[in-house]
Amino acid sequence: MATYVVGDIHGCFREWIGLKSKIERTDENAEFILVGDILDKGPHSLEMLKWAMEKIVPGSKYQMVLGNHETEKINWLKYVLKHQDKEAWNNRDIARNMLSADGYEFYKVCCAKNFTGDDWNSILMWLESLPFSIHKEIENEYRKVPYIILHNPQDSNGITETLIIHGHIPTTLDKCKNEGAIPGKIWIQGNRINIDCGLVYGVSKKQGLYGDLAAICLEDLQEIYYYNHYLKHPKILPKMKKM
């Protein structure tokens, strides 16, 4: 049994189930920690949310930390629950001011499903049960290794004696590539491990984008990918400068 930390899913429910199944085929007792941002952008935010609300419980096989997309939903839900008329719930101007501009996927789904106050309350209570960070200490054959799993790496500023695993910043972005990241691959910088591999941004060979969903095993730092573009297309790896 090992623990796997999974990058930003962003409504890509099919890929999440595929990656989970891929890991469980070799480790049926695997435990998972999601780094947040399971909602928005992708096509199946509601399916992802339903699965998460049923399965993710602190201390269980499936755990998760809050991402910024979940935090903004908390703030929005608190607002709509104070305004019990549907006009306020379905007000796009309010949503525009309070929610991300990533297609308003979660907002549109909630409106289409005609959610009630009880539905809002259930979602809010579950979101508020999620921790900001999870601390793990994993013992390998040499020593105990401390980890902090959180969403935004900026929230770990000043922490140097612990391995920090985070998401939030897709490695497909130019800002990451310009600093040495391989797009669509897990990126290790010092004591920080970025596992947001930009799944929801897809693949564009012209732009050098190879988005993927990734997990990293805390016991041995093995990397697992859903698509694993680099196994299929080894030539897309950038040339490394000679030292």
Image (spheres, helix red, strand yellow):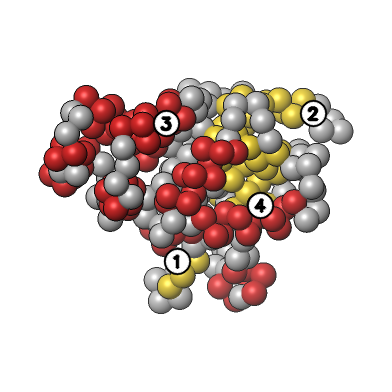
Secondary structure at numbered mark 4? helix
Q: Nearer the viewer, mark 1 or mark 4?
A: 4
Question: For the point 71% across and 58% down, which residue is it?
Answer: 22
Specify the farthest residue to the right.
141
Mark 2 or mark 3, whichever is nearer to me:
3
Q: Taking the image as drawn, is residue 152 in sight? A: no
Q: Earlier in the sequence, mark 2 or mark 3?
A: 3
| Quadrant including the C terminus | bottom right
Whole-percent x, y for residue 72 in the image: 32, 35
Say whether disc 4 or disc 3 marks the residue closer to the N-terminus.
4
Mark positioned earlier in the residue sequence (1 or 2): 2
Q: Residue at x 65, y 40 (%)?
A: 32
The amino acid type found where label 2 is placed reads Glu
> In the structure shown, which secondary structural element does the residue marked by tag 2 occupy?
strand
Q: Are marks 4 and 3 in contact (CB under 8 Å)?
A: no
Q: CA distance from mark 4 to mark 2?
A: 23 Å
Compared with 22, 216 (above or below) is above
Q: Residues within 10 Å of mark 2 (few under 14, many from 20)?
A: few
Report crowding for label 3: few under 14, some 14 to 19, many 20 or more residues within 10 A (C-alpha). Answer: few
- Residue 139 numbered mark, or none: 2
Badge 3 marks a residue whose secondary structure is helix
User: Nearer the observer, disc 3 or disc 1?
Assistant: 3
Quadrant containing the N terminus in the rendered view: top right
- Write down the quadrant of residue 54 in the picture: top right
Q: Which residue is mark 1?
A: 202
145 on left or right of 192 = right
For label 3, the residue is: 122
State whether residue 116 appears in this view: yes
Q: Please state which amino acid type lies under the numbered disc 4.
A: Lys
Q: Nearer the viewer, residue 52 or 155?
A: 52
Residue contact at pointers 1 and 4, CB within 8 angstroms? no
